[in-house]
Structure formats: C-alpha cells, structure tokens
Amino acid sequence: MGNGASVKVQMDRLKANNTTSYEVRKFVECFSGYCGKDKTSRALRGPGWRSIDYNGNGYVSLAETGNWVKQTLLDYMPWKPDFCESLYEKFYPSYIRSFKDAADAGKDREIAGMDASTDDYLQKGEFRIFCAYLCAYAVMFDAFYKIDCVDGDEERKFEKPAWDAQFTAFVGSPLVALNACATSPALAEAAYSEMDADGKGAVLLIEFCAWIKSKEVLMQTDLGKTLDLGD
C-alpha cells in the first residue's frame, strides 16, 4: 500500500463492513485512526508511541504492545470497561501476529548490548504498520472465530464440516478470498485444502491467517500491499 492515507481508508472500510461482528468493528474503530499519514493520524501516533514506549528506549516488546492495546481500548471507551476487557481478551491471538509482522517490516540488525535483534522488537518507524496490522488481523480472527464456533465449541481450529457450514456467510467480506469462496462452492472446496497446509484435517488460526494474507498479496489489494510490508 504505497499511499499512507490509503491505509487508513482501508481500515475505515474494514470497520464499516457489516459482514464482520460488532466487536471487531469497535476494535478497528479504536485503532484505525493511527494508520494514516494525515495530520490527525500523526497527532494520535505521537502520544501513542510515547505511551507504548514508556521507558523511551526505542524498542517495544510484545508484552508492552499488549498493555498498550488494553489501555488504548479503555481510553477510547472508558464508559465500557467490561466491554473493553472482553475485546482485549477476544482478539488477543491477533496481537502476536500483528507484532511479529510489523517488527519484521524494518531492516533487521543486532541491538548493541542486547542478545536480540531489531526484529524482536517494535520500533517507532513500524508503529503505524503495527496499528494497521492490529486491525487487519483482528478482522481475520473475527472471521476465523465465526467458523470455529459453528458447533458451539471454540477450539482455535476448525474442520471441513464447520467450513462447509459457514463459507456462504462471507458474501461481501472485506477479505477478498473469503468473499470469493462465499459465492463459489468449488472455490470453497479448493480453499479448504489450501488452508489445511499440513494436511492434518484441521485449520489452525495461523494457517487461516497465512492463507488470507497470501490471497490479499497475490491479488495486490490495498490490504495485501500493507500485509506484504512485513516480508
């Protein structure tokens, strides 16, 4: 995604899409404002970065990003603390993927005095990308959750019957591969085999997200161009 403003536009589209849950729309609404290069987004990211990098060393860990996500949700909707807590917990699996991909966006180098490299931490130049990934991966997890819970049992994986029962629910999805599958049983059939990368008969969250990402990148969507920055 070459244009910084278009990142925010894409995130705004994600939060407005009615195939996603109310929860993920509110989550994306909270963080989409950090994703642009416009004056308003920069004004948010300045104090946002100072808050996440609270010790000012320029390197932010996964734990620190998680704490920032929780506090940002609470600051955005202080009148709904229980709802914010539930959002934080529901989308927690997506933070790890967001952190890892964003931390890989910059050039990797060893950090002096630390047994680690810059790919192990989030840096200021990667903060905007991290916020975009928070939104994108939360939307992916929201879709995954819809399939995973089709039998009423959240297992963090789904099998073919759950996929067959739910793929038509993604008509109009902001994720191009899911939208395509929703209107084509043949594509949906082929997609499951692609998602089940290890051939063990179940699709894990990491496999699902990797499949979504590969299709967005292949189709050169705005979202795909953003997700490709982490590689």
Image: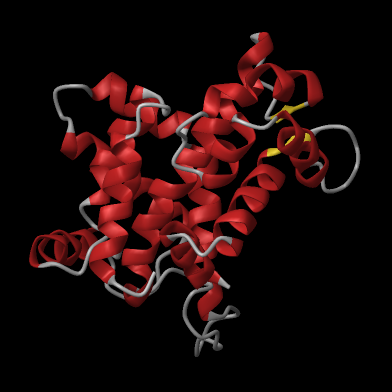
Q: Residue at x 68, y 10 (%)?
A: 151
Q: Is residue 167 left or right of residue 69?
A: right
- In the image, residue 222 above or below residue 161: below
Residue at the farthest top position: 152
- In the image, residue 189 above or below residue 66: above
Residue 35: x, y in percent?
Answer: 27, 59
Residue 52: x, y in percent?
Answer: 29, 59
Q: Nearer the viewer, residue 164 or 111?
A: 164
Residue 226: x, y in percent?
Answer: 44, 65
Q: Nearer the viewer, residue 88 or 197?
A: 197
- In the image, residue 122 above or below residue 99: below
- In the image, residue 178 above or below residue 51: above
Quadrant of the image occupied by residue 73: top left
- Is residue 105 in view? yes
- Is residue 64 in view? no
Q: Is residue 109 left or right of residue 69?
A: right
Q: Residue at x 42, y 27 (%)?
A: 19
Q: Nearer the viewer, residue 75 or 198?
A: 198
Residue 195: x, y in percent?
Answer: 75, 43
